[in-house]
Image (cartoon, helix red, strand yellow):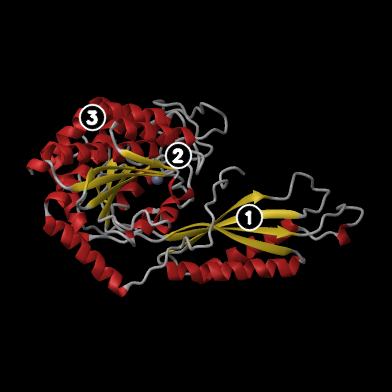
Amino acid sequence: MENSKEVWRRVDEKSAAFFALSDRIWGTPELNYQETRSAAEHAAMLEAEGFRVETCVAGLPTAMVGEAGEGGPVIAILGEYDALPGLSQEAGTSVQKPLQAGGNGHGCGHNMLGSASLLAAAAVKDWLAHNGIAGRVRYYGCPAEEGGSAKGFMVRSGLFDDVDIAICWHPAAFTGVNKPISLACVEVEFTFHGRAAHAAASPHLGRSALDAVELMNIGVNYMREHMPSSARIHYAMIDSGGIAPNVVQAKATVRHLIRARTLDEMWDLVRRVKNVAQGAALMSETTVAIQQLSGDANLVGNRPLEEAMHANLTSLGGPGFDAADRAFAAEFQKTFSKEDIRASYGRFGLPVREGESLSEDIYPLDFNADLFVGSTDVGTVSWVVPTVQCRVASYAVGTPGHSWQLVAQGRAPAAHKGLALAAKAMAGVAVDALSQPALMQAAKDAFAAFRADNPFQNPITADIEPPLDMAAH
Ligand SMILES: [Zn+2]
């Protein structure tokens, strides 16, 4: 407990600079693998804190690792700083108002995510140095969480090979240990090539790549009835072949995102989607080129670390929102549907509390949640290192993920309070693991027992190139 209190105090002492870092990242929202300014801010903060910094790791220009301490176990604290397209939004207003039409925005709160993780790492670094304890803490600056699978590439390049445990968090509307429920996922791009022709004068000479994309999507939509109900398939038109309806489209590209509970289930769906694509090519007399862009494993839990995280959160209590925070959040709730608000409780197995704009509670370690159907590249890390995450209330109850309302709340006082609580919880777990060999061993034993029965292959296989230009379309 003394160790926890010391590292929590160190978080508080440092927090102002990290709130400012989070706000600066909020102000420079950058997409997958284009996070040059955000990465530079994080690298500069690591340097200023005295970490040994390596940038451009794993062949990713915006990824980095900062290490501090000597010898002993290695604790990884994972951060992110990528934003989302089309979510530009003014801060602090509950009216939709883009700062830049069509611009980017931090609709998943990764400005807070990365800054809190770096703050936790800095506090643990100071705790190690002050107490003369053997051990290393590493901050992993991970780009492109939104579909770019940077952590999978970082795992593939061996950056986690000597790590003992990994710790992470995500901003949320409620506070508690993250349930290890997420879907394995993969993004695959299908580019069809046909033959251009004058669409009126010689249509019989054309073979439409756009037709092929449409036929493929119809085929995939017919698959939906015959796949596991927990699986998900989404698609986006990357290139529909141009703007001229009077030219038969010679080239068209569709990107499919395929999710399932396990990697095996996911790869089987990928096989079927590829068959559908080949069928569409056959029907339209086009050819199809298939390229995997990214891929994440599902999350694996680690009970001893989850218990340690829960104990830290319970000791810390909620974020400490005040009346002004609650009034601010209540304004945003007016823009949500009742269903959004009610459903957000269900995802954490919580009873609906009418009139609650911000949650101060720590939800129980064990609950029956509605299926959480997202994916994260932390999943891949969790298969190679004992990993734990928490969620921390940082915005209004009912705030939809990836929404302008989330962007608008991203640098409010409530966001800063969530950020600080997350940093304390993560730093607390790190010092618990570094000061209690029994906890470290229990985490490793639980991990080894799981892996003994569950072989793993990183969905980022040796032949996959990092999709550094995936956001450039
Ligand atoms: Zn996120």
- Ligand 1 rendered quadrant: top left
Name which of mark 3 and mark 2 comes first in the sequence. 3
Quarter placement of the C terminus: top right
Q: Amino acid at mark 1?
A: Val
Report the side of 152 relative to 392 (left or right): right
Residue at numbered disc 3: 14
Asked whether mark 3 lies closer than 8 Å to ligand 1, one says no
Residue 361 visible in the current orientation: no
Task: In the displayed orientation, state which residue is furthest to the right.
Answer: 201
Residue at numbered disc 1: 254
Give the residue at x 37% y 31%. 44
Helix, strand or loop status at disc 1:
strand
Q: Residues within 10 Å of mark 1 (few under 14, many from 20)?
A: many
Residue 429 image point, x, y percent: 19, 48
Q: Amino acid at mark 2?
A: Ser
Quarter placement of the N terminus: top left
Name which of mark 2 and mark 1 comes first in the sequence. 1
Q: Residues within 10 Å of mark 2 (few under 14, many from 20)?
A: some
Name which of mark 3 and mark 1 comes first in the sequence. 3
Q: Amino acid at mark 3?
A: Lys
Residue at numbered disc 2: 403
Residue 395 image point, x, y percent: 32, 36
Give the residue at x 13% y 41%. 132
Residue 431 visible in the current orientation: yes
Report the side of 336 relative to 269 (left or right): left
Q: CA distance from mark 2 to mark 1?
A: 24 Å
Give the residue at x 12% y 50%. 435
Helix, strand or loop status at disc 2:
loop
Residue 413 image point, x, y percent: 29, 27
Quadrant of the rendered structure where residue 94 is? top left
Q: Is residue 169 above or below residue 442?
A: above
